[in-house]
Image (spheres, rainbow, N blue to C red):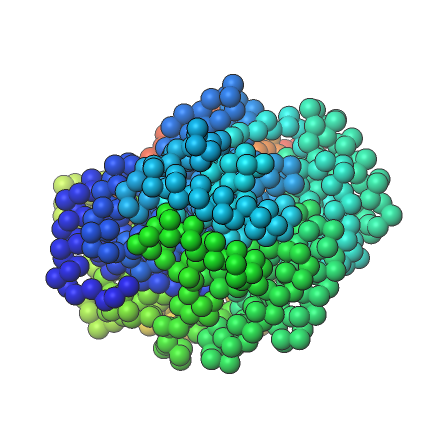
Amino acid sequence: MAERTETEKRILAEELAAAVRGEVSFAAADRALMTMDASNYRRVPLAVVAPRDAEDVAAALRVCREHAVPVVPRGGGTSIAGQATGVGVVLDFTRHLNRIVSLDPAARTAAVQPGVILDDLRAAAGAHGLTFGPDPSTHSRCTLGGMIGNNSCGSHSVAWGTTADSVRELELLTYGGERVRAGRGTDRTGAPTGLPPRLRDGVKALVDAELALLRTGYPDLPRRISGYALDALLPEAGTDLARALTGSEGTLGVLTEATVRLVETPAARALAVLGYPDESAAAEAAHTLLPHRPMTVEGMAADLVGDAAGLPRGGAWLFVEMGGASPGEAAARAEALCRAAADGTTDHTLVTDPAGQRALWRIREDASGTATRMPDGSEAWPGWEDCAVPPARLGPYLRDFRALLAQHGLRGTPYGHFGDGCIHIRIDFDLLTAPGIRRFREFSCDLGELVVAHGGSLSGEHGDGQARAELLPKMYGPELVGVFERFKSLWDPAAGLNPGMLVRPARLDENLRFASLPERPVPVAFGYPHDQGDFSAAVRRCVGVAKCRNTTTGPGSADVMCPSFRATGEERHSTRGRARLLHEMLSGEVITDGWRSPEVRDALDLCLSCKGCRSDCPVGVDMATYKAEFLHHHYEGRLRPAAHYSMGRLPEWLHAAAPVAPALNALARTPLAAVGKRLGGIAPQRPIPALATETFTRWWWHRRRTGKAPDAGRTVVLWPDTFTDHLSPQVGRAAVRVLEAAGLRPLLPPTAPPRTGAAALRPRRHRPLCCGLTYVSTGQLDRARAVMRRTVDVLAPLLRDGRPLVVLEPSCAAALRTDLPELLPDDPRAARLARSVRTFAQALEELAPDWRPPRVDRPVAGQTHCHQHAVLGDAADRRLRERAGLTGPLAGGCCGLAGNFGFERGHYEVSVSCAEDQLLPAVREAPADAEILADGFSCRTQLEQLSARPGRHLAEVLAEALGEGRVEGDPSGAGEAQAYEPRSRRS
């Protein structure tokens, strides 16, 4: 598309805004969010339009047609071949056209708008025992419109086929404004039904002229997705226009509504995981399982799954799901399959528990992201993501495929739909240099020939897009590709819909997403150890699979990512959206202000820094770190928001306020508090938490001075974090009591040069140590480094002999574990300190393995701290709770307060929405006798301010039980007092 003048853009914007009731945006941020999908390609759109209904779509098409502006329909943006990117107007269907219009359980059909999320349709159908058969791994965020555009499939295609098999009727608008209602069958002239006269006559004439070619030109295999499915228009195929248009990638018409088929779901499922010596053996075996009528036959090899638990012995695995009318029938069918396959397997596992099945399926569903990193951490990319061959040819094809990789010096990890002969893979292409891009092209051409030689399809699921369309003549020959071009010209003579896709395509090595990035690493504060110190490489981690766009976390899930997206539903507030904006900031084409960009600042403003993406994103995007990096540069040498001074430097203020805490608490209850909150950038709705009138450290030194602390036991260093010290000292006191009851000797670190004699027992009156968390979260990284260096200087001698550092506040533990070594990458003491960090439960499990906690015997509710979930893990906590009789799971997600986030002015509504996502409902639904657990100060504060049921740290619960309940294993209760009382006072 020729470059538009500013006047032309202004006129186009005015006319679109006047014609369309939905949102119309030419803003840099909105355009930047749409430059990429999940492919290797990038195009900068002219504008983004979110139509409210079909009439809006028609209006947008009319204006674009009058200005000769191309249009690209877009759903969830998870396409892997580049077909959801374009240089004209992008139609975003996810905002408004996302409704299930009707659902008919008797007819087993549903009418949906193109922006409907697949999982939403599945949930609605599930209430009637039905589902939509195709289920790609992006089912929680991909849209029905995108699935129809790409003819998506998924793991259950061996049972229920592709999307084309599930489409009954499509309502479309052509670029020229014609309305089409495509279904199956012909009118009295023998032409497909539902077409306006021009298209009716043209399509019939084209098909009649090319009957022989359409009957012989297509390979016969279940996953043939490439090209236009014109063979569906043959009389013997029922003249199925809806099927012919499915998979046309938005190049023929813009979908406004679809009627789709639903299928009955089995009452029960059992998952057989079959182990094989290697990938080739698994591939050879896959098609032999099809006579057993499995629902899925998915394959993975050891180089993808790593050390995943729950898999049987082997070097590769087939996941085979069997259905049944009852759990017993499903299990019996799975057992029969395992027996039939036994001769070729190394071992097998049968999983009937739904939670166990979900855990194993997550390995497969995350593969589209995890495969983007090789075992050595190097990058891998799509491009040949889903070739398909006849299932019986899969074994030989994979061997040839591996040989071709080796020939080109490339590496990749195949996985995917072995039962359908469809393979997914990410390959370590070098897409940053000219020689690497040449190799990418040469390999692609060679692999296209290899696929065709095995009777396969260039695309077996994700469509051709720009990645493969150039090679379609290898598969179909120039004559049939010429028919494709004539078909496109019939529907879209102005070439206004998604130009460059499928016919007359751009080269597969053009428009690569990395071409605009800086050639050299930009100066940064963090070390980015997993990306060789390169911020661009860190941002490149986001490949666009959009797991962060999940609107729900699903049953039994503890996922955190991405709370702000679930609260707002806006792309810019997803992890992917923020990563896209950072990419465009580095590119400098759309977002031109670099680190000073207001677009990036505004998108990051609602990032809670929950770190959920660090663990839940399949490729390990760490937006909390990227946000801190951006804020560091954005405000360098400039005045910061008031909240950065008030809450970013909270440790300093709390230390200074400690001597006058009672007076300040009283002042916080007066009208003057509102003035203070306004000056400090604090949300007016937030009460100010009370300051401790006796800090934890003061209590500690008083206890030492009066001889109440033990002088025996294994020493552990207990970290007096700011929140425990000044705001929740009861947590520290409880932890000391429990640690001592377990036979440990907790000591606080010194905060000044050591003193001898009686002076050593006096409290220190000087700056406390700090993990630097509040400075990091507000991007004050120079100050954070200074604080952290002092912490390392003081702690290094104490930890040199391997002593653990026990940290009660999960966010502080996470900061010491990750932020500290990444901000001090050249100091080996920082890495040692990070390795020494233990949570409260980890310390008890590791250092007092024989200690038995007191029995509490109550159900629990509450939330695992998001930083603990993301960085530290909660396995030790779950085991400790189980031993104490605290039963039930904790909710996932984020509490929404997230340190300073929920206290900042302008964040209150989002903060509450995040709390309502999982935490507050879990607490409201908990039994009356449930113990509400929340180890983080933010989580407890959020509960205190928004719920009638306050939360407590696990240490508080156990300390209380030590004081009033029987210690397990002591029937008489005689050990109770001794277990609670410090050892130094025992006789």
Number of marks drawn: 0
Residue 375 spot, x, y in % from top left: 62, 66
| Residue farthest toward the right in the current orientation of the protein | 343
Give whichever of 529, 470 is nearer the camera.
470
Against 769, residue 221 (above or below) is: above
- Asked whether, in this view, residue 761 is left or right of residue 901, the answer is right
**Nearest the eye: 878 or 277:** 277
Residue 676: give x, y in percent of width and height.
17, 50
Q: Residue at x 61, y 70 (%)?
A: 446
Check the image and name the residue furthest to the top.
106
Side of 58 where 418 appears, left or right: right
Q: Residue at x 14, y 57 (%)?
A: 10
Is 321 on the left or on the right of 255, as rendered? right
Is residue 887 at all visible to an observer of this figure? yes
Task: Give the camera-side residue of 239 and 912.
Answer: 239
Query: Residue at position x 34%, y 50% from top?
Result: 492
Q: Quadrant of residue 349?
A: top right
Q: Quadrant of residue 923?
A: top left
Figure quadrant of the N terminus:
bottom left
Task: Where is residue 452? Give x, y as percent.
Answer: 63, 60
| 563 versus 919 height, above or below | below
- Pick whichever, 775 or 483, lies toward us: 483
Q: Residue 489 at what x, y percent from top left?
A: 37, 52
